[in-house]
Amino acid sequence: MRNSLSTAHPFSKIIFSLFIILVTFLLTFIIGFLIAIPIFQINISNLTNVLSNYNDPDNLSFLKYLQTIQAIGLFIVPAFIIAYIFNSNSVKYLKFNSVSIRLLTLTIIILLASIPLINSLNVINEGMQFPDWLKGIESWMKEKEMSAQALTEAFLRMDSVSDLLFNIVMIGVLPAIGEELIFRGVFQRIFAEWTKNIHWGIIIAATLFSAMHMQFYGFLPRLILGVLLGYLFYWSGSIWVPILGHFVNNATAVIVYYLYADEMSKEVENFGAAEGSFIYLIIGLALIIPLLYLFYKERKKVAID
């Protein structure tokens, strides 16, 4: 089976990968949910209220548990299974290669410098309007966006350092590892093989990465973030680089929210995009271009095999 899949057409690899992701997620979620019932004392008949009531601390703990299970079952475990089946050496296939401190440092600075750009793209995306004949779709998208935003804000309510540390793991560490393994380590590789063009591979994987979040008014900034991480992965030849970059992006948001939640304003949330902070967008762009060039010059010559 491994021999046939390793030489299969990329489309077959994609279908097989999606199958592994679906099966692994369902098994992990079902097992995790059954374990959670006695631990969180979940009443199945009241499950709808549990999943929608974010003000109850017990419900929120359960939702955080489910979020953690999802990250493991939907991304991390499937990535290693897929890599093992395609190559028999998951570590090699996913490119857990060593990387220099210089490249890791550049990665951190690049991601921090990109925050004003990401925020500006988010503001542009939020202002998106559909024509009248698509108002129904627009209303549905806004409803989904508001629901996702409400859950995110509930997760980001932190009353102690322990809450902060848990959120850094749940929102920073696990998504950074899992999503980069799947979208950069697996899908970017397959789409580059299919199109025979690394640039298309990066763009398609980044598009899927953004679409997967199902937050339509944040599609554009996530797309650009995915493209950025895709090129950093390609140039470095190590999955550690996009994992670190993804972690920096997510963890920075968690830490900022923890420090400034009581005085959070649109100026803080839209740093670089809000009136009076536009200069930071200019500075960020002025830094990103030479930093990316430095990173490119330091890259390893790695072929997609």
Image: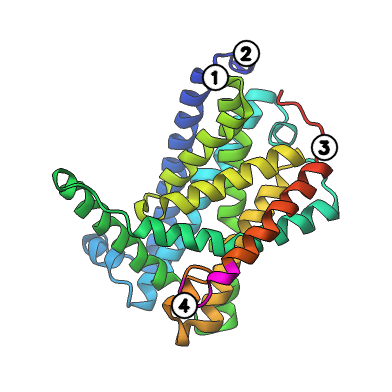
Residue wearing tag 3 = 300
Q: CA distance from mark 4 to mark 2?
A: 52 Å
Q: Looking at numbered disc 1 in the image, what kind of residue is underneath it?
A: Pro
| Rendered location of residue 123, percent (x, y) | 41, 62
User: Camera-side residue: 248 or 71?
Assistant: 248
Q: CA distance from mark 1 to mark 2?
A: 9 Å
Q: Dot 2 lies on which element? A: loop
Relative to 118, is 211 above or below? above
| Rendered location of residue 191, percent (x, y) | 55, 26
* Label 4 vs 2, first from the N-terminus: 2
Does the magenta-highlighted stretch encompass residue 275? yes
Q: Dot 4 lies on which element? A: helix
Q: How many numbered marks have been drawn onto this rendered protein structure?
A: 4
- Res. 168 visible in picture: no
- The colour scheme is rainbow
Left or right position of 25 against 194: left
* Quarter of the figure that contains the C terminus: top right
User: Camera-side residue: 235 or 152?
Assistant: 235
Residue wearing tag 2 = 7
Eye-nearest disc, 1 or 3: 3
Q: Looking at numbered disc 2 in the image, what kind of residue is underneath it?
A: Thr
Left or right position of 31 against 166: left
Q: CA distance from mark 3 to mark 2?
A: 26 Å
Q: CA distance from mark 1 to mark 3?
A: 25 Å
| Residue 267 circle label | 4
Q: CA distance from mark 4 to mark 3?
A: 39 Å
| Rendered location of residue 10, percent (x, y) | 54, 19
| Residue 10 circle label | 1
